[in-house]
């Protein structure tokens, strides 16, 4: 699987929350891409998730197809306190629809749900966009762990059925 989305939306933090159960207020920004692997024991199967955590900067954008082309799942992350990051996430989902495998499991993720007082992106607006485009949708917080396990388990369950 691959994580895509603007720099600073919390991609690395989501992976570290899931893999290590930790959160850092000063997470260093990712250079190029980072690779993680995690084994999930589900009732129906054991799933090994290979996770590519990409950097969000524009200068790395041309590298993204290397990561999503062979991916079974893509997680497109925006920050609920940033409309610009939501617009960018929409563009990623469109690129995936055009360029990635038609079978790819794609989730749209509104991260930093703990910062509700600074929210710029309505839950309903994002949910409707996801529904119209056949995307799974979660609001998460890497900080509080809200929906983080749920997200990765949903991906693993779907991949266990389809891969
Ligand atoms: P990335 O560039 O998408 O990998 O984003 P990072 O994981 O590096 O996170 C960018 C910044 O946002 C860091 O300062 C994190 O501590 C912070 N951050 C990430 N996820 C959350 C979250 O769910 N809630 C809050 N409040 N901050 C977060
Ligand atoms: Mg990162």
Image (spheres, rainbow, N blue to C red):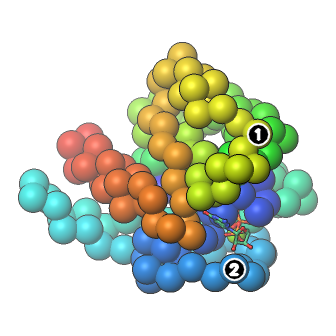
Mark 1 to mark 2: distance in Å?
21 Å
Q: Which mark is residue 25?
A: 2
- For residue 114, what is the image quadrant? bottom right
In the image, farthest residue toward the top = 132
Within-10-Å neighbours for mark 1: few <14, some 14–19, many 20+: some
Q: Position of residue 88 (x, y in %)?
A: 78, 40
Within-10-Å neighbours for mark 2: few <14, some 14–19, many 20+: few
Which residue is depicted at the point 56% across and 70% down?
Answer: 143
Q: Which mark is residue 12?
A: none
Q: Position of residue 146 (x, y in %)?
A: 45, 59
Answer above or below: position of 5 versus 123.
below
* Left or right, 55 with reference to 141: right
Mark 2, ligand 1, within 8 Å: the answer is yes
Which residue is depicted at the point 74% across and 74% down?
Answer: 30
Q: Label 1, on which residue?
A: 120
Answer above or below: position of 37 versus 52.
below
Mark 1, ligand 1, within 8 Å: the answer is no
Q: Secondary structure at mark 1?
A: loop
* Residue 70 seen in this snapshot: no
* Left or right, 26 with reference to 22: right
């Amino acid at each position: 699987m691959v994580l895509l989305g603007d720099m600073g939306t919390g991609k690395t933090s989501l992976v570290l929350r899931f893999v290590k159960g930790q959160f850092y207020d000063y997470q260093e920004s990712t250079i190029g891409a980072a690779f993680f692997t995690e084994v999930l024991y589900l009732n129906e199967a054991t799933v090994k998730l290979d996770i590519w955590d990409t950097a969000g900067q524009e200068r790395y954008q041309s590298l993204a197809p290397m990561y999503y082309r062979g991916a079974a799942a893509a997680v497109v992350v925006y920050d609920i306190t940033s409309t610009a990051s939501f617009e960018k996430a929409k563009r990623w989902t469109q690129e995936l629809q055009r360029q990635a495998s038609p079978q790819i499991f794609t989730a749209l993720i509104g991260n930093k749900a703990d910062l509700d007082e600074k929210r710029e992106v309505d839950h309903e607006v994002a949910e409707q966009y996801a529904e119209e485009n056949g995307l799974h949708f979660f609001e998460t917080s890497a900080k509080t762990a809200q929906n983080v396990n749920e997200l990765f388990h949903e991906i693993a369950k779907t991949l266990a059925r389809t891969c």
